[in-house]
Image (spheres, helix red, strand yellow):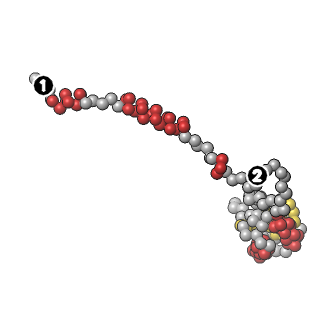
Amino acid sequence: MKRHSSYLQRASSYDTKLTPLIDVVFLLLVFFVWTSSFRVAEQWLPSRLSPEQGSERQTSSLPPPPEADFETIYIGIEGDRSTSNIRFRINEQDVSSLPALADRLKVIREINRQAPIVIYPSAETQLGQVIDVYDLTRSLGFTKVQFAVKTE
């Protein structure tokens, strides 16, 4: 015959139902998720509003700031190892010589000195020719100068 334990009888009288507790916690979680805001507050967004109030049109003598992100300038160099015949390209436009390349880079410098430049020499180009183009870009004040090579 089986004896009943007094421990099992006590546990049944204190048995807690967890289902209502889980429901309440879930409802609280849903409530907090729905009432929270995931948007950026407007006062944190950058703006260029004038600190002065009023509806008058104000003229500013300051030029607008240059664009932060500028198109990358690709300088292609194609040359032969045997001859000094060299061709330059700036963003797929042919340039006749190194002084003409310098003139075009000066125009770009006036727009944005921080423009990124990528020098892209062909496999047949002499190292001295590549260094001449690099020195030209650095002497004009460009600081973001990189090299790219075609891997085969």
For residue 124, above or below residue 49:
below
Q: For the residue marked with disc 2, what is the amino acid? A: Gln
| Residue bearing the label numbered 1 | 2
The residue lying toward the viewer, choosing from 4 and 10, is 10
Say which residue appears at 74% left-offset and 59% top-offset.
Answer: 68
Q: Residues within 10 Å of mark 2 (few under 14, many from 20)?
A: few
For residue 26, above or below residue 46:
above
Q: Give the structural element (helix, strand or loop) at label 2.
A: loop
Say which residue appears at 66% left-offset and 47% top-offset.
Answer: 42
Residue 44, labelled with which disc? none
Say which residue appears at 77% left-offset and 58% top-offset.
Answer: 67
The residue lying toward the viewer, choosing from 121 and 74, is 74
Name the image quarter holding residue 98: bottom right
Task: Residue 145: give x, y in percent of width and height.
Answer: 73, 68
Say which residue appears at 54% left-offset and 37% top-offset.
Answer: 35
Q: Is residue 7 left or right of residue 120?
A: left
Task: Residue 71: give x, y in percent of width and height.
Answer: 77, 58
Name the image quarter holding residue 12: top left
Task: Residue 81: give x, y in percent of width and height.
Answer: 79, 73
Q: Residues within 10 Å of mark 1 (few under 14, many from 20)?
A: few
Name the image quarter holding residue 110: bottom right
Q: For the residue marked with disc 1, what is the amino acid? A: Lys
Question: Which mark is nearer the camera, 1 or 2?
Answer: 2
Label 1 or label 2, whichever comes before in sequence order: 1
In the rendered view of the protein, which quadrant contains the N terminus?
Answer: top left
The residue lying toward the viewer, choosing from 99 and 45, is 45
In the rendered view of the protein, which quadrant contains the C terminus?
Answer: bottom right
For residue 116, above or below residue 82:
above
Q: Is residue 148 left or right of residue 110?
A: left
Residue farthest to the left?
1
Q: Is residue 19 visible?
A: yes
| Residue bearing the label numbered 2 | 53
